[in-house]
Image (spheres, rainbow, N blue to C red):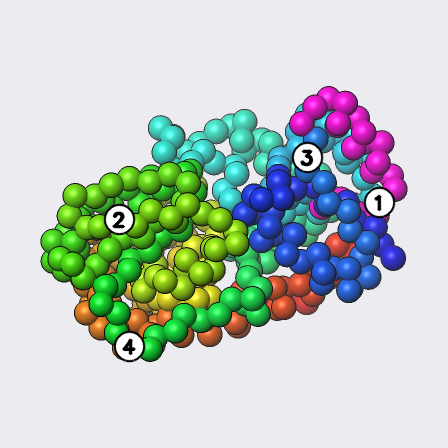
Amino acid sequence: MRKVLILIQGFEVPGSRYRILQYLPYLEAAGLDCRVMKFPGSFMGSLRLLGMLPAYDCVFVQKKRVHGPMLTLLRKRAGRIVYDFDDAVMYRDSFSSSPYSKTRQKRFADMVRSSDHVIAGNSFLLEHALGINRNATLIPTSLDIGRIAVKRRPAPADRVVIGWIGSRATIGYLRMFQDVWEELGRRYPAKVELKIVCDTFFDCGHIPVRKVAWAGETENDELRTMDIGVMPVTDDPWSRGKCGFKILQYFASGVPAVASPVGVNRELVLHGVTGFQAADRGEWLAHLSRLVEDAALREKMGLAGRKLLEQGYTVDVNATKLAAILKGETPAP
């Protein structure tokens, strides 16, 4: 049995949970003996890690760009290195004065160049990896849909819930479009509300805001109470690297999405089929208004989104690829 050491950001970090931790039962069934640990946060912890490496056939590095002497020692002592990333880590985020950083780009290039195989979360990220290392594979962020039920629609809801789920690092995108949510509240008084599932919130003056603290135990239940899911982002290199996980969560629960046509959003939100792409304020208001007014269309698009998810964005579909890469085999296309 091949031994794999999996280095993650944290056991409650979404990227760790969805990029690797949820696959562990599948990897064990495929004949891989996996040990998971957080990246060490101290010098002594790093030394202990380096001492462990020769006992493993493969080291899976989730997102962190190891650099400098530590990367040199990691490369020297590890049998194989598999690097997985699902964000545009070679750029600064959307809220920075400039997306470009020579330090970020160098650390990304060094990490990718030092890896035996690279796993990218979307086609934009894959293109960046392939420019440095030809041994790169696209595995989208996926969901275990066997654990997620589609929302029930026994009758048209008295109130239509426009929902967003995310972290304090991304709620800025939602707030940028506050004028859209406010206008919807004016158009449909007492009919619409904005639901925010996060650990930080903001208020609106013309639309009720339901504030829900995120918790892993209730996440899926909260998604099912949404009628429309939204993912507004700005068009910049950081946003193009996003893997559209919010959209996948909406689809898993049978909820249609309205999203900015940036990066992978274009592939997930099939305009007029699984939701709508909205390029400006006018389109956001037009598409959301249509969905608010048409319960049958919301259901049709939500179920189409669930079907798209089942075809390529599930753990069942992608576990085999991941296992093959960790074994040093060529993954199936």
Horizontally, is 257 left or right of 91 in the view? Answer: left
- x, y (%) of residue 171? 36, 42
| Marks 3/2: CA–CA distance | 37 Å
Q: Which residue corresponds to mark 4?
A: 155
Q: Given the image, on which type of amino acid does mark 1 rest?
A: Tyr
Q: Is residue 79 visible?
A: yes
Quadrant position of residue 249: bottom left
- x, y (%) of residue 99? 41, 34
Q: Which residue corresponds to mark 3?
A: 39
Q: Which residue corresponds to mark 1?
A: 56
Precedes in sequence: disc 1 or disc 3: 3
Judging from the image, what secondary structure is the residue with disc 1 in? loop
Nearer to us: label 1 or label 2: 2
Q: Which residue corresponds to mark 2?
A: 209
The residue nearer to you, when weighing 98 against 17, is 17
Horizontally, is 133 left or right of 195 in the view? Answer: right
- Which residue corresponds to the image point at 34% horizontal and 75% vertical from the top-left? 153
Precedes in sequence: disc 1 or disc 2: 1
Precedes in sequence: disc 1 or disc 4: 1
Nearer to us: label 3 or label 2: 2
| Marks 1/2: CA–CA distance | 50 Å
* Residue range of the region highlighted in magenta in the rendering: 41-60
Horizontally, is 93 left or right of 147 in the view? Answer: left
- Quadrant placement of the C terminus: bottom right
Residue most extreme to the top? 43
Q: Given the image, on which type of amino acid does mark 2 rest?
A: Val
- Which residue corresponds to the image point at 65% horizontal and 52% vertical from the top-left? 21
The residue nearer to you, when weighing 213 against 95, is 213
Q: Given the image, on which type of amino acid does mark 4 rest?
A: Ala
Judging from the image, what secondary structure is the residue with disc 3 in? loop
The numbered disc on residue 266 is: none
Q: Residues within 10 Å of mark 2 (few under 14, many from 20)?
A: many
